[in-house]
Amino acid sequence: ARRARLQASRGPGGTADGHAVKLLLNIGSAADLPQGEDGADAEGVGLFRTEFLFLDRKQPPSFEEQVSAYAEVFARAEHVVVRTLDAGTDKPLPFLGLPGEQNPALGVRGLRVDRLLPGVLDTQLDAIATAARQAGAEPWVMAPMVTTAGEAGDFARRARAKGIARVGVMVEVPAAALRAGRLLREVDFLSIGTNDLAQYTFAADRQHSVLADLLDPRQPALLELIARCAEAGVRAGKPVGVCGEAAGDPLLAPLLVGLGVTSLSMAGVCVPAVREALAEVTLDECRERARAALE
Ligand code: PEP
Ligand code: MG
């Protein structure tokens, strides 16, 4: 059966005066991709959360199973950013057999799992590279929960050794945002995970409803960190996107663009409203909103 490739039917997203902003999708598997041409309002996938492939099972997915899951997404979308496994607090994986922790949010999660179980990441990188070759795709691959430029550099070397050309890291930890410029000497792009970046910036559990005001993405401290990353991206000439929930909020999208981010990745249902919100404002208006919010 002919399957439509994900490609924005309404063209690229952007502001009223033509400043382009990539509108991308957050997905957990190929099943989250829109069916048919009409559903395709995004230019690609900005966050492919691969942990869903690993959840609820006693054994890790085999290499072949991983290759086929990744290849299916590559076959159906033009541009795909794959995030390597993000296991941890909110996403425990029994088969990893990680020891219990007093502070799981501050423990061995995301890229840090590699410290205890190096085989998992290398197998996944291999599977992504193999799937890409099969599908004739050039995926972007990024690691979650990166803290230092050293970690970013190590991840980049290992991903490139497998033949992955575009390597990035997520910015979810304030230390990474503070050193965004240095991180960008190691990798090709940054993707800001505002859900975790807010949690770690405000020392407030992202699931805790009593602390919701602290986790509001309009908090100036969070916006400053985002601005810092975006400015580092401009200096390096490399893309810096947002893939946390904030990116899918039509009230926040112009503000994030005003801070300088180059792409917004969100759930499919959010794309039309964000597209419309951006089309109603100029880049200068976005910048003005960003300035006001930082105040
Ligand atoms: C984030 O932290 O903002 C993010 C996109 O990752 P996740 O929500 O999967 O932790
Ligand atoms: Mg996260």
Image: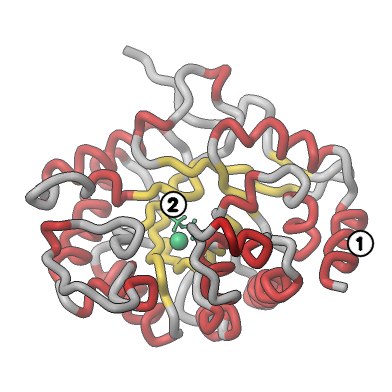
Q: Residue furthest top?
A: 1
Left or right: 125 in relation to 78: left
Q: Position of residue 21 (x, y in %)?
A: 70, 49
Type of amino acid at the residue the image marks with label 2? Val
Count the marks: how many?
A: 2
Q: Position of residue 67 (x, y in %)?
A: 20, 44
Q: Quadrant of the N terminus?
A: top left
Please name the residue that numbered disc 2 is placed on: 81
Name the residue: 45% across, 79% down: 186
Q: Residue furthest front?
A: 210
Left or right: 71 in relation to 185: left
Left or right: 157 in relation to 275: left
Establish if 21 lies above or below 113.
above
Establish if 286 lies above or below 148.
above
Name the residue: 12% across, 44% down: 64
Name the residue: 62% across, 25% down: 9
Type of amino acid at the residue the image marks with label 1? Glu
Residue 108 tag number: none
Sooner in the amino-acid sequence: mark 2 or mark 1: 2
**Quadrant of the image where one finds ligand 2:** bottom left
Residue 288 tag number: 1
Quadrant position of residue 29: top left
Name the residue: 38% across, 52% down: 82
Q: Is residue 34 visible?
A: yes
The answer to which of 289 and 82 lies nearer the viewer is 289
Mark 1 C-beta closer than 8 Å to ligand 1: no
